[in-house]
Image (tube, rainbow, N blue to C red):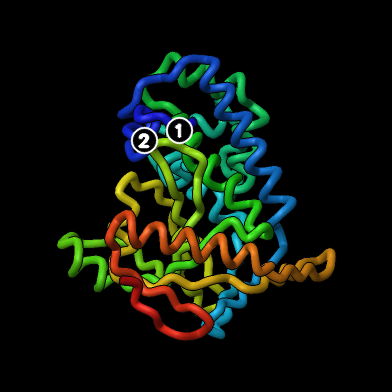
Amino acid sequence: MITKEELQYSSKSSISVPYPGDDYAYDTINRLSYALMMYKKRYEDKRIHFLLNNGEGLSFEIRSKNLAHLFGIDYKDLTTNPVMKPLLSSVLGFGEKEVINSYELISRIIENADKVIEHDENNFHKILNYYKVMVKTTCFIKMSAFDKFNFGVINFDKRTYEKTVGKSFYPNASKYLLLPMDEELVQFCMLGLVYDKYSGVMVPETFMTPTTFHRYLIRQEFLLPKEILIDGNDGFKHVVASREDKKQLLNLYKSIILTYNTNSTINEVGKYKRSK
């Protein structure tokens, strides 16, 4: 269960939040380990293709170099901040001139959980913001069941959001995966995707867990995923949404629109329909 405290602290740096206690710290690193296992099972060396109901195709992949960011670990601060960088050797066992990638950083944190927790309990400059890691990995694990069509797709227009809400929006994602959560405070996680012109696919930009998620849906377009093709070294997996899958997602969209008065568009069977 994601708590108010976790949400409050998850947007802050590791030095700005209190140490959560050993039990919570170990639970967090165990969750991090499970998330890494899910990455290797579901995403490593794979490309995921969605066919949407408007005829559009959406292809994305999650690269190992993006994992620390997705899992709530401040890779840049740990690897470049003069105060934090010595911990790479003393706590995580990296060589002084060793090239450190995101995946290996996460692996070393998991392998050296005792040392990480002992350090963070007794030092102001902590390696992890445990609250942030817990929230982000919870969302990631939930997303890893996407082949069960447990998500929606938002055709996101940044200018519409800024005009409607009256706030600047700095991410550049043009698609969001909307993931229903069985949580009281966090009803949805949102994964923003941006287009990578070099590979021709979309890649994750950010996970969001907004308590006012409906603001991001005002006058935006909802799309229904119809088919999923997973292309990997172990072959192809093709999953087609059942009529019940589509119905559940369509009812979810309609419920959001009616409950929060988002005036969103549901692109149903390739046609634009403004919900009333």
Front-most of residues 2 and 69: 2
Residue drawn where x is 47% and y is 38% of the image:
183
Q: Of residues 142 and 274, which is closer to you in this image?
A: 274
Report the residue at 51% width, 40% height from top: 182
Vertical arrangement, residue 203 with respect to residue 210, above or below: below
Q: Which of marks 2 and 1 is in front?
A: 1
| Image quarter in which the C terminus is found | bottom left
**Label 2 to label 1: alpha-carbon separation:** 7 Å
Instruction: Report the residue marked by disc 1.
Output: 2
Asked which quadrant contains residue 49, the reply is bottom right
Residue 273 or residue 221, whichever sits in front? 273
Q: Which amino acid does label 2 sit on?
A: Leu
Residue 204 image offset from top left, x and y in percent: 50, 61
Position of 49 with respect to 163 (left or right) is: right
User: Which element type, helix, strand or loop, lies under badge 1?
Assistant: loop
Q: Which residue is drawn at 49% across and 42% down?
A: 136
Residue in view at x 61 percent, y 77 percent = 51
Q: Residues within 10 Å of mark 1 (few under 14, many from 20)?
A: some
Q: Which of marks 2 and 1 is nearer the N terminus?
A: 1
- Residue occupied by mark 2: 7
Residue furthest to the right: 234
Residue 274 position, x and y percent, is: 34, 77
Q: 10 Å neighbourhood of mark 2: few (<14), some, or many (≥20)?
A: some
Marks 1 and 2: in contact by CB < 8 Å? yes
Badge 2 element = helix
- Above or below residue 65? Residue 97 is above
**Does residue 83 show up?**
no
Side (left or right) of 221 relative to 79: left
Q: Say which amino acid is labelled 1.
A: Ile
The image position of residue 17, as x and y in percent, is 34, 26
Q: Is any part of residue 136 visible from this angle?
A: yes
